[in-house]
Image (cartoon, rainbow, N blue to C red):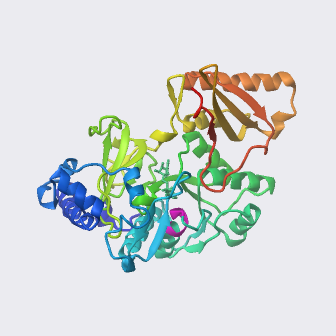
Amino acid sequence: MFWNKEMETLKGDALESLQLKRLKWTIRQAENIPFYKKMLNESGVDADGIRKVSDIRKLPFTRKTDLRTGYPFGFFAVPKKQVVRIHTTSGTTGKPTVVGYTRQDLDNWSELIARNMTMVGLTDEDTFQNAVNYGLFTGGLGFHYGAEKIGMTVVPSGTGNTKRQIEMINDFGVTALHATPSYAMHLAEVAESMGTDLPTLKTGLFGAEPWSDNMRKALEQKLNVRAFDSYGMSEMYGPGAAFECEERNGLHFWHDSYIVEIIDPKTGEVLEPGQKGELVVTPIVKEAMPLLRYRTGDITMILEDECPCGRGAKIARLTGRSDDMLVIRGINVFPSQIEDVLQSIPEVGDQFMVYVDRVNHLDEMKIEVEIKKEFFNGELRDLERIQRKIQDQLKAILQVRTEIALVEPESLPRFEGKAKRVIDKRGDKF
Ligand code: DLL
């Protein structure tokens, strides 16, 4: 099903000319921002110098640190009275990045969310529980308005009060659920303890953090849903930028609203489809806060295969950001790889925590792993067998030796938003 078939399936010259027109408009819009005015002057490029979409490569990149220099409103391209909403990124250190929206931006954004939800089969017949934070985080209000645009019955539950959330799903006949994968896992756990298998649910929309294919299988089985991956970031409006279709073989990036490139994060060289690198995004319809070649820090690749659904360009699921990659004795490890291995082991429960430290100048990784209730009270030799199994499988996939500590079910922290599963204590030890 399509929300806007013409835009979603635009191809060839028609797509090139729409993107070119919007890219030129975006460059002119960006000139209203002192940072970009200076950057464009210095690089000697302006909208007239862009004759085809690939000329975008003439423009310099924008980095997250650049946006910080403009705190709070220095990257707004319109007078503040035209900014009708503000969100911020969830920066844990220093000031957050502030993003602004005009009325038109909010319309554009809800259109994208409406496309995503329609693409996975949701309609005005559905009841939608939006179990993400409704504050400055873009996930809550972003999905809310997209779902209302379609005419779904929206339950704006936010996060927390998890038992009540489960009751609402059952009492209101909720068919579609939106949550971070971490919170969805917690919801599943609480549903299980309440003895319900959530019979009305059918669709799960999960995103805002990396989650593995094995996590998908676990969530589908526990929550009785078909699960779809949703990608976005505050600087691109929020969620909605890219989303899986029914094929679930990559995420469609909305090509009429974003131009997508993949670069080598070290050299800045643009990579070919099929090559993994850092995702660089130029939104081309944003009024309040245009961005040029924004370096996301997220690692993925462009997939070129024609999707049977008829829509355009896709990116591969995101395994993590270049900055959550752990380097353990020279080997790159993403927390999502650890999750994938753990989820494939039947004795393992839902939660884990990773601790990295440097002992005698060597990196050591310790992982606390919850195991399922039925295995916890078993014999010591069973526990040792499980421990070795986890260690061996992690070693086989990650090429890194880990220390595994099995811990009691329900003893590790649960997360309502994005999970923080890694504690790296190496920072000040060399
Ligand atoms: O997380 C927007 C969002 C809300 C997306 C709800 C999906 C659902 P930020 O808080 O600005 O925005 O964080 C953006 O989160 O750069 C990625 O590193 C990560 N991320 C978002 N979606 C995914 C995903 C929202 N599906 C940052 N897979 C991004 C992996 C994701 N990582």
Above or below for 318 versus 232: above
**In the rendered image, which quarter contains the N terminus?**
bottom left
Q: Is residue 188 left or right of residue 253?
A: right
Percent coordinates x, y for residue 278 in the rendering: 37, 41
Q: Is residue 142 visible?
A: yes
Q: Is residue 48 left or right of residue 85?
A: left
Tell me which residue sits at (14%, 56%) in the image: 50
Query: Foreground: 361 or 186?
Result: 361
Principal secondary structure, stretch drawn in magenta: helix
Q: Which residues are magenta?
A: 137-142
Q: Is residue 147 left or right of residue 419?
A: left
Tell me which residue sits at (27%, 64%) in the image: 30
Number of marks in the image? 0
Percent coordinates x, y for residue 200 in the rendering: 66, 63
**In the rendered image, which quarter contains the C terminus?**
top right
Above or below for 250 versus 345: below
Q: Quadrant of residue 135?
A: bottom right
Answer whether residue 140 is magenta in the image. yes
Q: Is residue 239 visible?
A: no
Residue furthest to the bottom: 81
Q: Quadrant of residue 355?
A: top right
